[in-house]
Structures are given as C-alpha cells and as structure tokens.
Image (cartoon, rainbow, N blue to C red):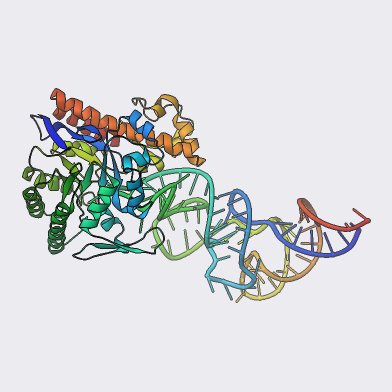
Amino acid sequence: MSFGFTLIKKDPGSSARLGRFTTPHGEVRTPVFMPVGTQATVKTLSPEDLVALGAEIILSNTYHLFLRPGHELIREFGGIQKFMAWNRPVLTDSGGFQVFSLADLRKITEDGVTFQSHIDGGARHIITPEYAVEIQESLGADIIMAFDECTPYPATKDYALESLERTLRWAKRCQTAKTNKDQALFGIIQGSMFPDLRKRCAEALVDMDFDGYALGGLSVGETKPMMYEMIEASVPALPEERPRYLMGVGTPEDIVEGVDRGIDMFDCVMPTRNARNGTFFTSFGKVVIKNAQYEHDKQPIDPQCGCYTCANFSRAYLRHLFNANEVLALRLGTIHNLFYYINLIRTIRMNIDKGTFTEFKKDFLHSRIQSVL
RNA sequence: GGGGAGGUUCCCGAGCGGCCAAAGGGAACAGACUGUAAAUCUGUCGGCGUCAGCCUACGGAGGUUCGAAUCCUCCCCUCCCCA
C-alpha cells in the first residue's frame, strides 16, 4: 500500500498535530492546505507557479472532469498528474459536493445521483458510488473520496439521519468497488449540525476502516461555533493514526481553529476565488483592492508578505488591473492569496513543531480582532 | 444655399400627454464569496426628509393642457446628404 500517514508530534496544549503522509507522487506534510483545481487547473496558475508557492498537493474534481474532458481521456494520458503536468500528489473529490451545489440539477436515489449536465443542460448521468470510484481510478489521484451527499443546511434531524445512513451505505459500496491499491480512499462524515449524528457517523466509518477521514457538510451556512462544535463531536471518534480532512474549509481563522481541534488537511476555493474577485487576505485582515482608497496607494497588498506580487506591485497598480479587467490581475491576486494560505499553514506547522501553537493561535486571533475594530 | 436626422439624469441610450426622478447598458461607489455552474453575484447610484412627502431635472425661452421629457412657436447647438 502506497499511502501511509505518520503522526510526528502532538501539541501539548491543544489537539493540533504535526504529521506527514506518503503517496505515489511524494510526501505531504500536515497540517496542509490544498489549493483547489476543480477542472485540472488551479485557475490562472501553472504547475510551476504552484511549486514556487509551496503547494504540496492539490484538489481536483470527479464530477467536473467526468463531464469534461471525460475520465477516459485522462486515463489515456496516464492520469491527471500527467494530463496537467503536475507531478505532485492530487486528491479528487467524489462529486458529493455537487450533490449540494448543483441541487437543482440532480436527483438522489438509493442507487446514486442523477445529474443533468450543468454545461449544456442536456445529457443526464447517474453517478453511483461504484462509478465515482471507477472515475476516480481513471483519473488516478493519490487520494480519492467516497461518494457522499453533502447534506444541505438547515436539515431536519430526520433528513440528516436518512442522508447520513445513505452516505454510509455508499461509503461501503465505494470500498467494495475499489480496485487500485495505490490510491488511498477517505470516508466522509456527515450528520448535519447534530453532534450525536456526527459522532455516530464517524464511528461507523472508523469501523469500516478508511485510509483517512473527512468531515463534510460543513461551512454550508451554519455559524462558526456550530461548525467548530461539529468538529469537536467528530474528531474524538477518529483514530490518531489516520489523517483528518475538513472539507471545503475555510477562512484563515477557520483553519487555525480546525488545526486546534485536530484537523490535518484543508481545502477551500476561498483564496483563489476571492483573488479573482479582488479580495486579498493579509496579515491585518482583508483588502478589497477595487476600493477607491487604494487609488494612489504605492504600498504592496501586504507589506509583511513575501510573495511575488507583493515584492513587485503596488495596490494602485493592482486596482488598475482589476478595474481595467486585465487578466494579469487574476493571476497576481491568486499568487498572493495562495501564498498567504500556504504560508499560514507553514507557520502553523512550525509552531506545532516548536510547541508554541497555542500562543500562535492566541496572537493570530487577537490580531484579526484588532484589525476588525 | 437646399434636403434630412437629432439634442434625455456622469457616459451611451430607451421613452414620445398622466402609471417618469425617467427602461436597459456602462462607469462609479460599496458588499458578498468556505469539498468552484463564479474573471461571479448583490446593493446604491439628482438633493432633502423617519414612511408620507417636498424640491431640482429631459438644449433655451415662451405657449397649449387639469397635467408636458413627450404637443405648438421661436431661438441656440450638433451630425449627415446634395450644392
């Protein structure tokens, strides 16, 4: 088995941990942030850029690549890494999130989910747990995800339970369908905002024995305290020697809070999407670059930042690029935001290693509050 | 000189007697974005006021009408065609 997780260190003052996992495409240190490359590209960046930013693993998507260009095509190329010229690890989401985000275009049955193509509204495709695994085996990611239903919020307890139990049955079917020993398979915990359901789902998945465990169905509209409570309800049920992945999260604060509660892996579109929409993350809060206050501003986005964009360009110039709708704006913004995220997670790792995570967290959250005031 | 088209709120541009502070774009200003249907979406966009409402507005000046951006008269200005 090519996948293996090693726990290196546990923080004495919190549930934070330092670890690493190995995959056929190399090693990844945790906690890790995975940039999102849904369509086999992290929008606006080349693989070379990603390496320069220090990205160790990226996320891609089963549903989107299945529809276009088709998983068969990617298999012909020898997998997604070769197809997109990224030779480091990849994790593919199963399409479970599209069950949530494309809710108007899909129908759930016990067998699986039928999607109406969001691209042309035409062809309907049924994705079953078995098919999700087959597609992900064709894509050849290092880590693949069980097919789940990302439960919409709010959900009644009855529905949350029904959805969770179906997701568990699907998880079992994914496990049975899997044939490629080189790929790791992660199970996904659901249960909406009910701590007892979260715990129960986590325990059931642990009984099935997955390579890693993900927390899904979070950051879907609930409050932050609720999300943190759900993490706290799930993590204690998980084995220490397996990685824990908080799917789709989150803001910089969420990542710090997640690590504090024992999470090892994160992914989120926020740095990349917000960059394209002109909102940048900085050490002092966010900068909405299109705002008039930056018109004459000669400073970089964040004077504390060591990224290429901040080393070379002013806020005024970036504002101009955004206002003029120039494509470079998107790229420079994405470089900055991903640098911020990857640097944040690197700093977190360093602090866990030094045993100073708790102080780091305190200072980090304090500086965020100060910048809001 | 003759013939024709037109001047609308920051810009373009609809409206062509009341439902018009005036459609729709753009610009501007602000907000949102969490396993990407996203280089997207939302809000504001004449002034004052707490809703009501009041004031100033459709080139200018008059006029018709209960009522005009819309109809009439004159004037000013743009553009096109023919000389």
Q: Is residue B19 above or below residue A128?
A: below
Horizontal relation, residue B22 to residue A217: left or right? right
Asked which quadrant contains residue A365, the reply is top left
Residue drawn at x 30%, y 29% is A54
Residue A260 horizontal/vertical position (percent): 14, 36
Q: In this view, does A185 lie to the left or right of A233?
A: right
Number of marks in the image?
0
The residue closer to the viewer here, B40 or B30, is: B40
Residue occupying the far top of the picture: A354
Locate the N terminus of chain A by quadrant: top left
Q: Which residue is drawn at 40% across and 58% down?
A: A119
Q: In this view, does A324 lie to the left or right of A333?
A: right
Task: In this rendered view, identify the residue nearer to me: A70 or A216.
Answer: A70
- Is residue A325 visible in the rendered image? The answer is yes
**Where is residue A47 drawn, in percent x and y?**
37, 35
Left or right of B67? Residue A256 is left
Front residue of A171/A322: it is A171
Residue A358: quadrant of the picture:
top left
Would you say residue A151 is visible in this rendering? no
Q: Find residue A60 and report its image quarter.
A: top left
Q: Where is residue B9 in the image (x, y as percent from the top left)?
A: 59, 53
Counting from the top left corner in percent of width and height, residue A352 is at: 15, 27
Q: Quadrant of the C terminus of chain A?
A: top left
